[in-house]
Structure formats: structure tokens, C-alpha cells
Image (cartoon, helix red, strand yellow):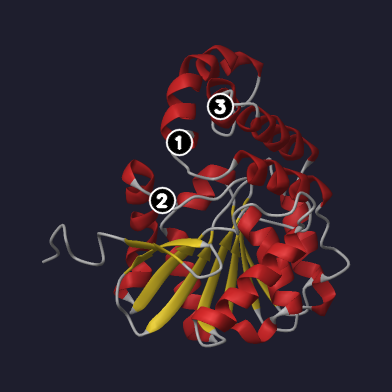
Amino acid sequence: METLDNPRRTPRNGVFSNGMEYATWGRGVKTLLFIQGGPGSAVPSGLLGGMFRREFDAYLAAGYTVWVVTRRRNMPALHTSADMADDYADLIAAEFGGRVDLVVAKSFGGMIGQYLAARHPGSFRHIAMVVTGAELSAWGKDLDHRMATAVAGGELSGAGTVLAEYVFPGPRTRWLRELLGHAVGRRVLGRSGCPAADVLTEARAEVAFDARAVLPFIRPPVLLLCGGRDAFFPREVAEETARLIPDCTLIIYERWGHVRAGVSRRIARDVLAFVRSR
């Protein structure tokens, strides 16, 4: 029976020599690199850390050590998703012996993952991309840009109000977002430790992102998992992304949006099934 100090429950935190921060769970012989969403990346802790860990239970039980690694700190202002993919590839080369067993890349992390797969296919054995696609919707670009701008301006309540729009979109729930804004901004964004300038850099990278030209050059098999009601990466974008990748298995969770699909424990089960099948 697991205890609270069991490595499957309590993360070990640190900073790699290149300044990328990490939290890691488990001591399995296989290595899983998790590339989180954005804009902004943080070492998960507290309530957020517990949510992350629950997502990883199935991977830990399957013998993986899970590494959540942030983006570089103090990135150049025009650092792109492709540049961030190069950062992760350099990290894998320097800290993981040149290859990890599995990459799971979610949302904005999945946008980075598309370039990692295209430019650095030897850096992993398997890759799964979760609630992502070749281009972010116009609504998603606007939302993330507003959130990043508020963070950069030190307006955590305003940023929290925008972040609540992920779950409660539309004019009818504006009152609820404003009610939750302060608490969400303080608890989720106020403790992230991610420099505000980096949040803006990632938002700019999201707005500029369009991977359609590079997707046909991805050679490894890819698992793409998306929500059928995802407003950030609509179904038609997910289907187009899958068509452009030469060897892509697409799973769509029909009734789920971006957040619901992204946190589901079905993700890990489907990823592990994909790995076993390959």
C-alpha cells in the first residue's frame, strides 16, 4: 500500500544545468517526458501537483518514471515553438542519454511536440500528442494572449478571470469568471514561478504557430488524442492534423472539450495501449 512519502505520490523537484526546472515521480526503468501546456510553464506543486500526479498514476503503475519539465527560463522574446522543441531535444541529449521512452505533450506542449517529432525523431521511442493540433483557433489565440498580457502586467485577478474562461466560456458566465478571477489568479498563476516575459513569449509563439508545413515530415508513429468539442483545437483541425502526419492514430473523445479531455484518465490508458501495440 502506498504511503505519502512514496515516490509515486511525492515528487522530487530540481533544476537541470540548462535552467529548465522539473518535478519527477516514480522510479521505473522507463522514462516519460511530459511537456505541459501554456502559455507559461511551471513545476506543479500543491493542488496542481496533486492533479498532475493523478494523471500519471497509470504510467507509474506501468513502470515509468515521469518527468514534468518546464520550458527554458528567460527565453528570447521571439523564441518559437520550434526553438522550444530544440530546447527539449537538447535536454534529452544532455540529461536522458539521448532518448526517452515516451513523450506525452499536451495542448501548447503538443504544439512543441509536433516540431520535436519532425526535427528530432531520434529523441524518443513513442510520442502522444494530447488536445492539440496544427493551429490554435482564433478564439484560443485571443484568450491566451489576453491572459498572458494580464500576467505580464501583474494583473493576476484579470489573468485569473481569463483563465476561468477556459471552463466557463460565453457572456452568460462572465459574472462567475469575475467572481473566481482573484482566487484562480492567486492559486494557479501567482505561484507558478514562471517569468512574466516567458508567458508573453509563449503566447506570441502560440499566435504565430502553424505546423501544417512540417507535419508531413514527421516519420515516427504519432498518437493524437482530441476532444470532439474542443474550442481551442476544433475537430476539423484535429482531423486535418492527423491527415498531414504520415503515420497518425487519431482518437476523438466525442463529447469532451479541451479541459475535460486533457485531464481524463482515459488518456493514459489509450497512450499505454498505443505503446503496447507498437
Residue name at image x 64 percent, y 60 percent: 110
Q: Which quadrant of the structure image shows residue 28?
A: bottom left
Could you tell which of marks 2 and 1 lies nearer the N-terminus?
Answer: 2
Quadrant that contains the N terminus: bottom left
Type of amino acid under label 3:
Phe
Please state if 131 lies on the left or on the right of 15 as rendered.
right
Badge 2 marks a residue whose secondary structure is loop
| Residue on which disc 3 sits | 168
How far is mark 1 from mark 3, CA to CA? 16 Å
| Residue on which disc 1 sits | 188
Residue name at image x 36 percent, y 48 percent: 45
Q: Please tell me how crowded label 1 is: few (under 14), some (14-19), or many (20+) other residues with Cα within 10 Å.
A: some
Badge 1 marks a residue whose secondary structure is helix
| Residue on which disc 2 sits | 44
Where 147 falls versus 271 (above or below)? above
Residues tagged 2 and 1 counted as in contact (Cβ below 8 A): no
Badge 3 marks a residue whose secondary structure is loop
Q: Nearer the viewer, residue 141 or 24?
A: 24
Please state if 211 lies on the left or on the right of 255 as rendered.
right
Residue 200 percent location from the top left of the image: 70, 41
Residue 171 percent location from the top left of the image: 65, 16
Type of amino acid under label 2:
Pro
Residue name at image x 64 percent, y 52 percent: 74
How far is mark 3 from mark 2, CA to CA? 23 Å
Type of amino acid under label 1:
Val
Residues tagged 1 and 3 counted as in contact (Cβ below 8 A): no
Could you tell which of marks 3 and 2 lies nearer the N-terminus?
Answer: 2
